[in-house]
């Protein structure tokens, strides 16, 4: 997105300048691209983004190449001049600029663009006409973004939400805008200031940020977490912390396991939020269940359940479940070729005891009989959360056959590790779908809808999908790939930590015994049957000892991860320069293996990385 913004800034100037040299059409001033018209020479050019522009004349194609080079140089010069001006200026984006006209919010509201931009109708109109322009405000600046609508990387529909109003609340939601490249681009469209009586103070601007209203309590977000994004809050558990908690490690003797446990404490459990954490009153909270007909209408009025009803009407069902983000270990894929997404290491995964009512019990109480569930047209269960942006709630779906089968242990959880669910994890109720990617385990449950169709949300249709390594952002078609549900077999090393030095002693045979510990898990309830560890790049392997987090779970319903450890013997002759690369790979109950490297499973979103995990350590 940042590259796109930089490109657009340069493109706007260079294309305009090239068109100036190659065609002689109606003159306009460069002021529409500049916050201050006097900052640049007033050159004539034609607007390549105008809806009513005619194509350039064929005679221009016979022009010499010199004007193109000159135009490009002029355009690049203007771009660099603007960049230097922005860098030299101490003024923050959106601050009042002396000499620019003032506009009231009522005047801004009168500029919402031509009606056709909302319907995508092919209608020619004068983009320069005052009534057809689209204005927004940011902090205390006023901007004419008419020409940028179709270029917005986040889709036209998103930018139109702010038409004729403040974009501050939207940018507070979509934090990718919080970068100088984006605000620099916006400043090129500056036309004025908000009137003095309607200008916002810094305190008022801060209050527009929905993340300042999150109901987070002290201690909910452990300081030991590795924070990958603050807004929305996303953080993973460091390998060292997982190792100490899961293997009962004494920090003074990290190589010796103690009492092995499978649970990650709530504050240390990884946190993945897509939107601001909603503030929910448990006394008034309720969720609803709806059933659709084939035409999308409802078969019956919605059935609502309060939190108290969920706790008192149904038996409490507890199940230990590992939840993993689809982007876990994305950093390894990013090393192959850059991808878009949070830079997760091995800690975007966690295991907990979840307790609540079984979904199938709640559905039956709501009148969803086996006869209803067997209707051929009902194929999906949509889960909608209370977290939302300005247009939509967070929503995803899973196959109804998965959700409504009592053998799959899908629950509406209100406890996590014996405590009420913390805000970051979905208080007061979260859907827990064992064996399925974390994105489908919807938090802050608002609605369950049984439907013929899967969710049409962004998170179901245009994200959390895998693609060929040959697919990039220039040719990707999200419709060609199904939404991720079950995740592939996975494993990672927690000890030793990559890049650390270990003081180990040689035995009588001049060998070193290296303790190695980690986790393994596979989607769909497939248990782990073996973990192999190697220190010679896979030439030889040692089988690790396995420790199921929940030994009562059968092999084909192993919702919780398996921990493992091994003492790998390294002959002194195999140690080169005192550095050793440790590798692990797991095998699940369907005998699925992990691929050797991430190279051949690279994908543009960096999801589904389950290649061999590797750490390098130096032996002292």
Image (cartoon, rainbow, N blue to C red):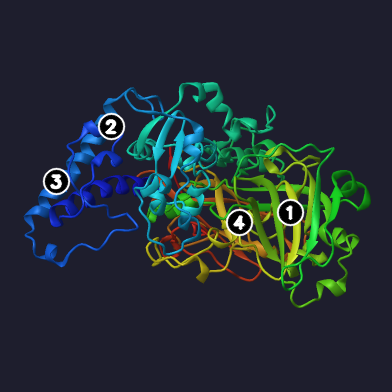
Residue hosting label 3:
73
Q: Residue furthest right?
A: 313
Vertical placement of 375 versus 99: above or below?
A: below
- Say which label, 2 or 4, has the lower sequence index: 2
- Say left or right for 160 vs 425: left
Real-space Cα separation, disc 2 to disc 4, in angstroms: 68 Å
Real-space Cα separation, disc 2 to disc 1, in angstroms: 55 Å
Residue 544, labelled with which disc? Answer: 4
- Say which label, 1 or 4, has the lower sequence index: 1
Vertical placement of 499 versus 436: above or below?
A: above
Residue hosting label 2:
36
- Say left or right for 379 vs 602: right
Mark 2 neighbour density, 10 Å: few (under 14) some (14–19) many (20 or more): some
Residue hosting label 1:
432
Q: Nearer the viewer, mark 2 or mark 4?
A: 2
* Relative depth, front residue between 440 and 178: 178
SS at mark 3?
A: helix
Mark 3 neighbour density, 10 Å: few (under 14) some (14–19) many (20 or more): some
């Amino acid at each position: 997105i940042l590259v796109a913004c930089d490109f657009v800034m340069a493109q706007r100037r260079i294309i305009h300048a090239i068109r100036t040299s190659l065609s002689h059409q109606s003159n306009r001033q460069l002021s529409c691209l500049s916050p201050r018209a006097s900052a640049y020479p007033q050159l004539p050019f034609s607007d390549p983004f105008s809806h009513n522009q005619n194509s350039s004349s064929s005679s221009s194609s016979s022009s010499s190449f010199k004007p193109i080079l000159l135009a490009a140089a002029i355009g690049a010069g203007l771009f660099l001049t603007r960049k230097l001006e922005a860098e030299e200026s101490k003024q923050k984006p959106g601050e009042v600029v002396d000499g620019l006209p003032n506009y009231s919010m009522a005047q801004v509201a009168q500029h919402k663009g031509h009606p056709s931009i909302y319907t995508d109708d092919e209608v020619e109109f004068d983009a320069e006409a005052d009534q057809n322009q689209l204005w927004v405000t940011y902090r205390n600046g006023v901007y004419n973004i008419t020409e940028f609508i179709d270029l917005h990387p986040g889709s036209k529909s998103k930018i139109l939400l702010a038409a004729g109003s403040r974009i501050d609340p939207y940018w507070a939601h979509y934090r990718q805008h919080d970068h100088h490249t984006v605000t620099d681009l916006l400043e090129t469209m500056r036309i004025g200031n908000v009137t003095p009586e309607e200008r916002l103070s810094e305190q008022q601007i801060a209050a527009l940020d929905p993340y300042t209203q999150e109901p987070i309590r002290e201690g909910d977000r452990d300081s030991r977490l590795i924070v990958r994004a603050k807004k929305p809050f996303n953080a993973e558990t460091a390998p060292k912390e997982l190792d100490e908690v899961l293997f009962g490690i004494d920090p003074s003797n990290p190589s010796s396991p103690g009492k092995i446990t499978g649970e990650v404490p709530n504050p240390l459990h990884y946190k993945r939020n897509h939107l601001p954490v909603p503030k929910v009153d448990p006394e008034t909270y309720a969720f609803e269940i709806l059933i659709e007909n084939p035409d999308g209408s409802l078969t019956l009025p919605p059935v609502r359940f309060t939190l108290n009803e969920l706790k008192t009407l149904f038996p409490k069902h507890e199940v230990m479940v590992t939840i993993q983000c689809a982007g876990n270990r994305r950093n390894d894929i990013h090393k192959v070729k850059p991808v878009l997404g949070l830079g997760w290491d091995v800690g975007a995964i966690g295991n907990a005891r979840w307790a609540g009512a079984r979904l199938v019990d709640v559905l039956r109480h709501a009148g969803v009989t086996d006869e209803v569930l067997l209707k051929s047209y009902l194929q999906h269960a949509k889960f909608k959360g209370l977290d939302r942006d300005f247009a939509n709630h967070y929503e995803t779906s899973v196959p109804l056959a998965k959700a409504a089968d009592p053998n799959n242990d899908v629950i509406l959880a209100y406890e996590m590790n014996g405590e009420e669910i913390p805000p970051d994890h979905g208080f007061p109720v979260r859907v827990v779908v064992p064996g399925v990617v974390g994105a489908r385990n919807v938090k802050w449950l608002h609605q369950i809808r049984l439907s013929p169709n899967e969710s049409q949300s962004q998170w179901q249709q245009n994200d959390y999908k895998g693609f060929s390594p040959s697919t990039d952002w220039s040719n990707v078609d999200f419709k060609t790939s199904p939404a991720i549900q079950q995740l592939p077999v996975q494993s990672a090393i927690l000890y030793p930590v990559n890049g650390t030095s270990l003081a180990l002693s040689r035995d009588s045979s001049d060998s070193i015994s290296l303790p190695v510990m980690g986790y393994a898990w596979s989607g769909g309830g497939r248990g782990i049957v073996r973990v192999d560890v190697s220190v010679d790049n896979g030439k030889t392997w040692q089988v690790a000892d396995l420790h199921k987090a929940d030994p009562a779970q059968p092999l084909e319903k192993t919702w919780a991860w398996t921990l493992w450890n091994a003492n790998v013997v390294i002959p002194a002759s195999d140690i080169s320069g005192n550095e050793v690369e440790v590798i692990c790979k797991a095998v699940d109950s369907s005998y699925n293996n992990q691929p050797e490297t991430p190279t051949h499973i690279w994908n543009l979103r960096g999801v589904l990385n389950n290649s061999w995990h590797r750490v390098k350590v130096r032996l002292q």
